[in-house]
Amino acid sequence: MNYIAHIRESDKQVQTVEEHLLRVKELAEIYGEKIGIKHLAGLAGMLRDLGKYTNEFKEYILEAVNNPNSPPKRGNVRNLHNKVHKMIFLQK
């Protein structure tokens, strides 16, 4: 199953979560290398959006694209990200 990170408005091109995480990792490593934390920055970049690897986020993003005049509230995603971060870092 492909999880969706973004859907481009202009042509509805999907960026998968895997593609997104790898691109964020690459960019974070470029910036991190300048201050001597290349790999740490890459890891942090990847961990940041792990909450997108959920059915809830996939439903959220599809709802936002399919109903642009009545998109779901953004806070719903923030809550999802917080839940995933707690699961990973606090083991709750």
Image (spheres, grey):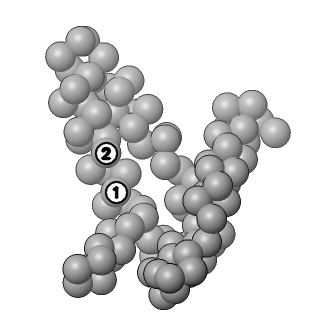
Residue appearing at x 77%, y 36% in the figure:
91
Query: What amino acid is at disc 1?
Result: His
Mark identifier at residue 24? 2
Residue 15 placement (x, y as % from top left):
32, 69
Cβ–Cβ below 8 Å for labels 2 and 1?
A: yes
Q: Residue furthest front?
A: 69
- Tell me where residue 33 sits by quadrant: top left
73 with respect to 28 (left or right): right
Q: To which residue does mark 1 refer?
A: 20
Residue appearing at x 23%, y 12% in the figure:
35
Nearest the eye: 69 or 86: 69
Few, some or many C-alpha atoms within 10 Å of disc 2 (few <14, some 14-19, many ≥20)? many
Q: Residue furthest right?
A: 92
Residue 51 placement (x, y as % from top left):
58, 53
Residue 85 appears in the figure: yes
Residue 88 against residue 12 in the figure, above or below: above
Query: What amino acid is at disc 2?
Result: Val
Residue 54 against residue 35 in the figure, above or below: below
Element type where label 2 sits in the image:
helix
Element type where label 1 sits in the image:
helix
Nearest the eye: 40 or 67: 67
Residue 9 against residue 76 in the figure, above or below: below
Residue 1 appears in the figure: no
Residue appearing at x 30%, y 17% in the figure:
37
Few, some or many C-alpha atoms within 10 Å of disc 1 (few <14, some 14-19, many ≥20)? some
Quarter of the image with the C terminus is top right
Residue appearing at x 72%, y 47% in the figure:
83
Nearest the eye: 77 or 19: 77
Mark identifier at residue 88? none
